[in-house]
Image: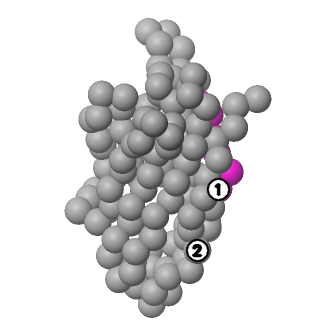
């Protein structure tokens, strides 16, 4: 069973910052598009940011300019630096590793971590 180990999260005031970390097994990390998703109460899970193993990043419009996704291949870890947090960023955040072949996509998920932004 593949485990993505997530750390970070917590309670922060609006305008504050948090960093999430997600460590994956090396044989998964190097082959995956790594990403962060979030799910707010009563809403569907949504993409926050992704990064390919070539370093290409993609962000949801709602977090562009405030969040930064990055990787450390020495530690097989992906980070999400969140600055300028807003109450609407409150959600459970999930780490994702997606291995895409020509015909099949395999997704691995970490445990969620709660991010709560107070106004």
Q: Position of residue 73 (x, y in %)?
A: 43, 35
- Report the residue at 51% width, 72% height from top: 90
> Is residue 100 a member of the stretch shown in magenta?
no
Label 1 neighbour load within 10 Å: few <14, some 14-19, many 20+:
some
Q: Which numbered dot is residue 10? A: 2
Judging depth in this view, the residue of 20 and 85 nearest the camera is 20
Instruction: Give the camera-side residue of 79 and 117.
Output: 79
Label 1, label 2: how many angstroms apart (C-alpha)?
12 Å
Q: Which of label 1 and label 2 is nearer to you? A: 2
In the image, residue 60 above or below residue 84: above
Q: Is residue 109 magenta?
A: yes
Q: Count how many numbered circles sit on residues in the image.
A: 2
Dot 1 and dot 2 residues touching (CB under 8 Å): no
- The answer, for residue 39, to whether it is visible in the render is no
Q: Quadrant of the N terminus?
A: top right
Could you say which quadrant of the image residue 88 lies in?
bottom left
Badge 2 crowding class, 10 Å Cα cut-off, few under 14, some 14 to 19, many 20 or more, is some
User: Which segment did they paint magenta?
Assistant: 107-112
User: How far across and down, in percent of the image, does residue 3 sit?
Assistant: 69, 38
The numbered disc on residue 112 is 1
> Residue at the location (44% across, 9% down)?
102
Q: Quadrant of residue 96?
A: top right
């Amino acid at each position: 069973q593949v485990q993505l180990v997530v750390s970070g999260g917590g309670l922060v005031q609006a305008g504050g910052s948090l960093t999430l970390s997600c460590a994956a097994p090396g044989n998964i990390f190097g082959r995956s598009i790594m990403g962060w998703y979030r799910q707010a109460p009563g809403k569907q899970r949504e993409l926050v940011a992704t990064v390919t193993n070539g370093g290409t990043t993609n962000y949801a419009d709602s977090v562009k300019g405030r969040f930064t996704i990055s990787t450390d291949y020495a530690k097989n870890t992906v980070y999400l630096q969140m600055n300028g947090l807003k109450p609407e960023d409150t959600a459970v955040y999930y780490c994702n590793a997606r291995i895409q072949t020509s015909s099949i996509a395999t997704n691995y998920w970490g445990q969620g971590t709660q991010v709560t932004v107070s106004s």
